[in-house]
Amino acid sequence: MKAMVQDSYGPPDVLELRDIDRPEPAPDEVLVRVHAAGVDQGTWHQVSGLPYLVRLVFGPRHPRVPVPGLDVSGVVEEVGARVTEFRPGDEVFGIGKGTFAEYTTAKTVVRKPANLTHEQAGAVAVSACTALAVTRGVEAGRRVLVIGAGGGVGSYAVQLATAAGASVTGVCGPSKVDLVRSLGAVEVVDYTREPLTGQYDLVVDIAGGRPFPVLRRLLTPRGTLVLVGSEEGGHWLGMGRQFGALIRRPFWTQRLRAPISIVRRAALDELSALLADGTITPAVDRTFALGDVPAAITYLRDGHARGKIVVTP
């Protein structure tokens, strides 16, 4: 099969399109023929090996799994000996092991809703599960601010908070204003032209760089600040804002959260129901061919993506 393979960590061009052996599913896994695979910041961490802390998971010197990619949507080709829920021909989506390939093995998958294309379903798992975690507990009538509303996690966070009955303000760049408004935000702030004002019950800051005092001023006295992702902290830890939040939390009247999202079956089941009834819809910007994964990652890192981007073999 064809796959994008890396022998070492580095910039996106360390990836090469090669012919490799098709993987074999473990007893509790399925083999999926990949129709679409999402690209997110986590895949950049896989490829770059940065910050170095992530190498404890991916491999200290070189990637343990040479094919990157996590999100997947496709068709079950083969099932492991202990799998009873799926059979060949089933359409599924979720998390795979090296999804920038024609085939991948997967354990955490659910059936794809019939109203979604594979391109849409392939853009769900990582970003939507993260958004589900950060918006958990949002109540009707609350005011929610999503900073980074035009990206992968942000586009789902806007929809999930809106579905819960919250009044959502989205913050994004000028090219994403129309998208964020279409997702349900009652107000959209172009951060290049307008300052952030007002007070909110929940502020979701996605990979932002605003100082903590600025973010606190946007919170009600009992509001909650949620930090998602961070590029601060250097090449070693890369979690400067999260550690800063832990230090400050005992001294704040407001609540501070920096959740680590793990894609679990229960979350995928919940998202599948919301997708099936149209409560949320994946916002897919562009589709790249398998051999163009380096370009897809670069496009993402340059901040161009409006919502999600996917790769199709």
Image (cartoon, grey):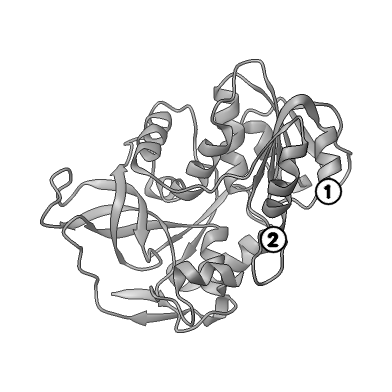
In the image: residue 260, left or right of residue 203 = left
Whether residue 293 can be seen here: no
Identify the image quadrant of residue 276: top left
Q: Is residue 272 above or below residue 296?
A: above
Quadrant of the rendering where the C terminus is positioned:
bottom left
Q: Amino acid at mark 2?
A: Glu
Q: In front here: 220 or 33?
A: 220
Disc sitting over residue 298 in the figure = none
Label located before the other in sequence (2 or 1)? 1
Residue at the far front: name it: 250
Q: Position of residue 236 (x, y in %)?
A: 65, 71
At label 1, counting other C-alpha atoms closer than 10 Å, the crowd grade (few under 14, some 14-19, many 20 or more) is: few
Disc sitting over residue 211 in the figure = 1
Disc sitting over residue 231 in the figure = 2
Q: Position of residue 16 (x, y in %)?
A: 45, 81
**SS under mark 1:** loop
Residue at horizontal 61 percent and vertical 16 percent from the top: 140
**Is mark 2 in CB contact (under 8 Å) with mark 1?**
no
Q: In front here: 106 or 232?
A: 232
In the image: residue 279, left or right of residue 161 = left
The Cα–Cα distance between marks 2 and 1, rounded to whole angstroms, is 14 Å
Residue at horizontal 26 percent and vertical 58 percent from the top: 32
Residue at the far top: name it: 141
Whether residue 118 can be seen here: yes
Q: Amino acid at mark 1?
A: Pro
**SS under mark 2:** loop
Quadrant of the rendering where the N terminus is positioned:
bottom left
Q: In front here: 52 or 135?
A: 52
Residue at horizontal 22 percent and vertical 56 percent from the top: 29
